[in-house]
């Protein structure tokens, strides 16, 4: 009850300012998607813009609550305020309606929301720059402004609905479809993706499954796809570490191998295979560790120097002979 009272107090203080806010006269966004995955319950936002560092401005999401994309002549507070309202039990349509109704500049806004139950709502103001519009579907909304063609949001919807894979993959397909349809009339510059868990763990940093930003790039959506794949690999590495903690080394090795198959070793400069090898060696699986350590050494020979520093930090047994064997094997002179 105290937490609910606090949320109402916050809204009472902040919401009136929305109506008086001065619009930025330059439109921040081009196109985005908000969605809830029916299978996992994950909530997410993906966006591309001809604007430097769009990530801190457009996408907002909170595990167990919802997701918001706020764009066009942007009013950033739609993000946190929309999440506050949904956290208090408002549906996405109710939350969006409440905010738009207090915004004197609603005609230049473009906002979309999805809540934890998959309810969606979108608003494209009458003065959003042509071509501008949105389309909502089952637990998702796509929206765009300043497009080359007025067919972009429909193309995004079709791509999302017909894509396979996880939520990140399907949202990337929607962004790629927008580009293929002509994209932003100004070009492209930055992109971001934010996906959170279905339920909060109480630790926001653990709730964010994907929180990736491309600040300035000639192909921001392509670069975002590369980062998403890299994140998938690290998620698998983390899964492997979890199995090590549970003393299930076979499952750990399986997860590690999956991670290694997702990205080439050079994508992490040897970081991923090195720590996989060290984790296995520390677990008493020296033989299994060697192939990974060799792969790391190929990427950067300085990994061999690091091995000898790890026993003092408890990351390897305090065994000089073991360290020597591992370093020799990395260099190709040992078993």
Image (cartoon, helix red, strand yellow):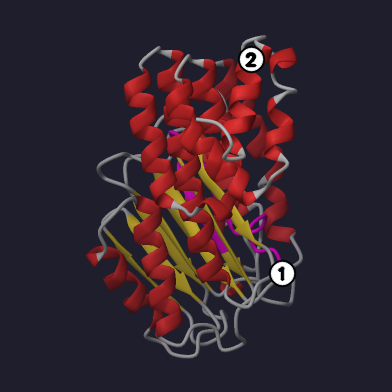
Characterize the local packing of mark 1: few (<14), some (14-19) or many (20 or more) Cα atoms within 10 angstroms: some
- Expressed as whole percent of the image width and height from the top left, the position of residue 11 reads 64, 39
Q: Are marks 2 and 1 in contact (CB under 8 Å)?
A: no
Q: Which mark is residue 52?
A: 1
Q: Residue at x 23, y 66 (%)?
A: 162
Q: Is residue 114 in view from this perspective?
A: no
In terms of image quadrants, where is residue 257?
top left
Q: Which of the labelled discs sits on residue 321, or is there none?
A: 2
Judge from the rendering whether residue 233 lies leftward or rightward of residue 73; answer left or right: left
Q: Which residue appears at 41% of the width and 30% of the height?
A: 199
On the image, the x and y values in percent for residue 45 come to 48, 55
Report helix, strand or loop for mark 1: loop
Judged left or right of residue 246, residue 108 is: right
Mark in front: 2 vs 1: 2
**Residue 228: x %, y % from top left:** 48, 54
Vertical position of residue 318 compared to residue 173: above or below = above
Rendered image: mark on residue 75: none
Q: Which span is picked out in magenta?
A: 53-70
**SS of the residue at dot 2?**
helix
- Eyeballing the image, is 17 above or below 154? above
Q: Is residue 276 above or below residue 173?
A: above
Residue that appears at 30% across and 39% down: 40
Whole-percent x, y for residue 210 in the image: 51, 46
């Amino acid at each position: 009850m105290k937490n609910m009272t606090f949320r109402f107090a916050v809204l009472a203080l902040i919401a009136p300012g929305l109506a008086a806010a001065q619009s930025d006269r330059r439109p921040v966004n081009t196109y985005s998607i908000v969605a809830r995955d029916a299978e996992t319950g994950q909530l997410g936002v993906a966006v591309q813009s001809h604007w430097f560092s769009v990530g801190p401005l457009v996408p907002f999401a909170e595990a167990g609550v919802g997701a918001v994309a706020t764009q066009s002549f942007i009013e950033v507070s739609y993000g946190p305020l929309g999440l506050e309202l949904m956290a208090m039990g408002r549906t996405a349509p109710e939350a969006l309606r409440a905010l738009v109704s207090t915004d004197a500049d609603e005609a230049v806004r473009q906002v979309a929301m999805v809540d934890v139950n998959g309810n969606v709502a979108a608003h494209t103001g009458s003065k959003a720059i042509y071509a501008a519009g949105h389309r909502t579907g089952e637990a998702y909304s796509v929206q765009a402004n300043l497009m080359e063609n007025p067919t972009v949001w429909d193309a995004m919807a079709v791509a999302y609905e017909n894509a396979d894979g996880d939520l990140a993959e399907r949202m990337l397909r929607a962004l790629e479809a927008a580009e293929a349809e002509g994209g932003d009339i100004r070009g492209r510059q930055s992109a971001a993706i934010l996906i959170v868990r279905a339920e909060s763990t109480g630790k926001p940093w653990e709730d964010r499954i994907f929180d990736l930003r491309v600040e300035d790039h000639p192909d921001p959506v392509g670069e975002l796809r590369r980062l998403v794949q890299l994140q998938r690999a690290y998620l698998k590495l983390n899964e492997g570490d979890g199995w090590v903690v549970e003393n299930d080394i076979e499952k750990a090795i399986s997860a590690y191998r999956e991670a290694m198959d997702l990205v080439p070793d050079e994508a992490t400069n040897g970081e991923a295979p090195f720590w996989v090898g060290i984790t296995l060696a520390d677990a008493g699986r020296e033989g299994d560790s060697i192939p990974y350590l060799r792969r790391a050494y190929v990427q950067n020979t300085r990994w061999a120097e690091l091995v000898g520093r790890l026993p003092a930090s408890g990351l390897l047994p305090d065994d000089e002979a073991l360290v020597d064997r591992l370093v020799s094997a990395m260099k190709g002179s040992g078993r």
